[in-house]
Amino acid sequence: MHSVVELMRQRKLSESQPLARQDDARLALVLEGGSSRAAFGGGMVGALEEAGLLSVFDAVYGASAGALNGAWLLCERANANIHGWWSPESMKSTIRLTNIFKKLPVVNGDYLVDEVYENFTPMGFDEILASDIEYHPVATDADSGASTDLAPLIKDRATLKQAMKATTRVPLLSGAPVSLGGRRFIDGGMAENVPVETALAQGATYLLVLRTKAPSLDLPTTAGLKQRAVARWMHRNARGAAHTWDNRNVKKQQLEVLMARDSRVLQVAPPANVAKISMVGSDLKVLREAVEVGRRCMTETLRPVLGD
């Protein structure tokens, strides 16, 4: 049994609660982003919530859409609002490919947080702020390119919402960098698409990592047109972080190696043969199936924890 699964099982059996642990471990839930691809992660957090396992974690770290999935688990509204992944009122209004011709955001994170999360699939902002489990959305500093934990900048509902916008501010597709705490931020996946290094640096001893694609040690590649288009956007809007965009594929590979080799890390990922989903995918049938694939993957991982 993997050490992460064993720790989860022990904490579940003992009804261990955050801030009152009987062990000296620090278990972090770490969530990969990927915009529409994070539908897989949506199903995974739904399975965690259904199993009543939120309390086994000490902290939740997420980049981009992974930070949003983590927020749904923290406020325990993941399953109540899971339909947001395949509802036109949510996805079709947040992702509009035709907006590129209107010079409007293709992926509208502001609308998602301010409208969808308030009126259609209500996010429990106050519950997240009050939770004993730490919430660490990760973004990329637009002026240095550094991966940045936004938790110290979250003070209230307004700054929590601003942090959610910051971690999901995809270059070229989502608008200008987001200001928070006197700094400017862009998408967390730019600097650390799976924020395992941040979690480990802050004392995590075990990590359950929810992936939105199958792990691969191959060096990722980016299509030339996308590489040049985003590079131009970075030089205009986030010049200090341009090097992060240029080097991000090497960084992704380094993180893959870390996750594959570190015995403290357990990854849960969709199979390599599932249908590919682009960052701006909006096929509602495909997204709904991705949610179910993610749920099945997590359910299988949790069998030893739940004694099935």
Image (cartoon, rainbow, N blue to C red):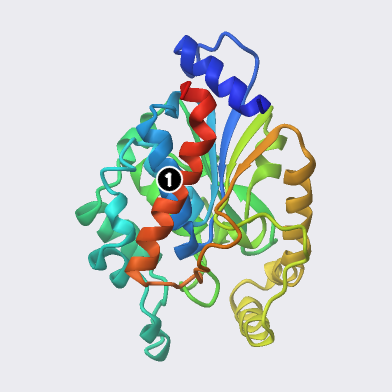
In this rendering, the answer to whether 129 lies above or below 69 is above
Give the mark count: 1
Q: Position of residue 150 (x, y in %)?
A: 54, 46
Element type at mark 1: helix
**Image quadrant where residue 289 sits:** bottom left
Can you see residue 168?
yes
Which residue appears farthest toward the left when viewing the image? 119
- Look at mark 1 in the image and give the residue it sits on: 295
Camera-nearest residue between 69 and 232: 69
Looking at the picture, does residue 185 appear above or below residue 5?
A: below
Q: Position of residue 11 (x, y in %)?
A: 52, 16
Q: Nearer the viewer, residue 159 or 217?
A: 217
Q: Position of residue 268 (x, y in %)?
A: 58, 44
Q: Residue at x 63, y 76 (%)?
A: 234
Residue at x-position 58% and y-position 62%: 273
Looking at the picture, tell me which residue is in the foreground, 175 or 45: 45
Residue at the image point whose x is 44% and y is 13% from the top: 15
Residue type marked 1 = Arg
Q: Position of residue 34 (x, y in %)?
A: 53, 61
Work out which residue is located at the far front of the displayed protein and give it: 308
Would you say 139 lies left or right of 37 here? right
From the viewer's perspective, is 223 left or right of 258? left
Horizontal side, residue 83 vs residue 98: left or right: left
The answer to whether residue 68 of the structure is visible from this angle is: no
Residue situated in front as seen by the camera: 30 or 145 = 30
* Dot 1 alpha-carbon crowd within 10 angstroms: few under 14, some 14 to 19, many 20 or more: many
Quarter of the rendering occupied by the N terminus: top right
Q: Residue 112 lies in what quarter of the image?
A: bottom left
